[in-house]
Image (cartoon, coloured by chain):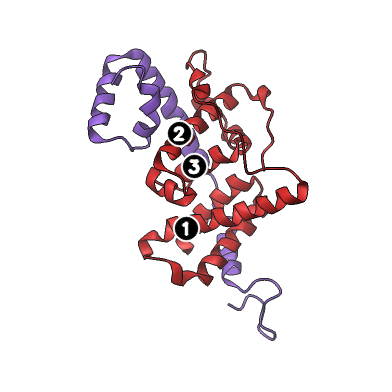
């Protein structure tokens, strides 16, 4: 793997989608080249931010959302059943 | 299905950019999934299946919105080949110092073809193959969209003043 190829494969490397052989080649490149390591660090930081951002929030009032999702749609509730009856 | 509820909501929030729309989208996704449970091939495929439903409902909604507004919000121009390769990694501020709110805002501004795979990769933690199934695009396209998405996001985070596009 050449330094020129690193930016093209770095996403797949960080996403764990490179083959074992290509991963080993990438490791060699990162070990040997400071510029490639810098790119790796910068990309890893962006991936880390995206993972943090992606996990930042859970569904609000999870149980209420779950319960209403399981309930009949508004306006389609069976007459006579109590509110929230599944 | 319910074990995926939080992930569905997180993805919906990042696709719609709006909490109440995200709640609606999540609820409709769960309802549709329960209505069509017989179409689920195997329990192991439930997660990909649920996200495929969520995306389908989301796309239908923005199609409807675009018809109402008379604008095209689906066919975003994709970057020219090589356009996103101009990032030289020079003079970058330390990207790890970016506040998460800024990341979310930049994500919201990404054109949909780039936002979708990024949300699926980082919120859904899906593999490229699963993203390819959910978006119904080839594996190579998933890779190039993710590549483009991250370059665009980086440039958005670096130069927020250049923002020109609005997103659905």
Q: Which residue is mark 3?
A: B117
**Quadrant in the picture for the C terminus of chain B:** top right
Query: Mark 3 packing: few (<14 Cα in 10 Å), some, or many (20+)?
Result: many
Q: What residue is shown at x 35% (from left), y 21% (from top)?
A: A5
- Residue B25 to residue A5: above or below: below
Query: Mark 2 packing: few (<14 Cα in 10 Å), some, or many (20+)?
Result: some
Is label 1 in a helix, a strand or a loop?
helix
Mark before the other along the chain sequence, 1 or 3:
1
| Chain A palette colour | purple
Numbered badge on residue B4: 1
Q: Residue furthest right?
A: B69
Mark before the other along the chain sequence, 2 or 1:
1
| Chain to which mark 2 belongs | B
Question: Which sits in the foreground, A18 or A34?
Answer: A18
Query: Mark 1 packing: few (<14 Cα in 10 Å), some, or many (20+)?
Result: some
Numbered badge on residue B144: 2
| Chain B palette colour | red
Q: What residue is shown at x 67% (from left), y 78% (from top)?
A: A77
Residue B5 on image: x %, y %: 51, 58
Is label 3 in a helix, a strand or a loop?
helix
Numbered badge on residue B166: none
Residue B112 on image: x %, y %: 59, 41
| Chain to which mark 3 belongs | B
Residue A37 lies in what quarter of the image? top left
């Amino acid at each position: 793997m050449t330094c020129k190829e690193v930016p093209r494969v770095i996403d797949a490397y960080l996403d764990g989608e490179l083959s074992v052989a290509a991963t080993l080649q990438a490791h060699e490149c990162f070990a040997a080249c400071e510029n490639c390591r810098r790119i790796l660090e910068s990309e890893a930081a962006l991936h880390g931010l995206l993972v943090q951002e992606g996990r930042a929030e859970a569904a609000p009032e999870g149980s209420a959302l779950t319960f209403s999702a399981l309930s009949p749609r508004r306006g389609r509730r069976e007459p006579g059943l109590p509110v929230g009856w599944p | 299905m319910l074990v995926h509820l939080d992930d569905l909501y997180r993805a919906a929030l990042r696709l719609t950019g709006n909490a109440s729309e995200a709640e609606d989208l999540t609820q409709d996704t769960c309802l549709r999934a329960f209505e069509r449970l017989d179409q689920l091939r195997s329990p192991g495929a439930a997660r990909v299946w649920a996200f495929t439903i969520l995306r389908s409902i989301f796309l239908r909604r923005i199609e409807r919105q675009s018809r109402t507004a008379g604008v095209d919000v689906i066919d975003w121009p994709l970057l020219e080949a090589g356009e996103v390769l101009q990032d030289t990694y020079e003079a970058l501020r330390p990207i790890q110092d970016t506040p998460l709110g800024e990341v979310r805002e930049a994500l919201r501004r990404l054109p949909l073809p780039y936002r979708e795979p990024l949300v699926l990769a980082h919120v859904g933690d899906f593999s490229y193959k699963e993203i390819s199934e959910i978006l119904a695009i080839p594996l190579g396209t998933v890779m190039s969209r993710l590549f483009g998405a991250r370059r665009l996001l980086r440039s958005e985070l670096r130069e927020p003043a250049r923002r020109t596009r609005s997103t659905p």
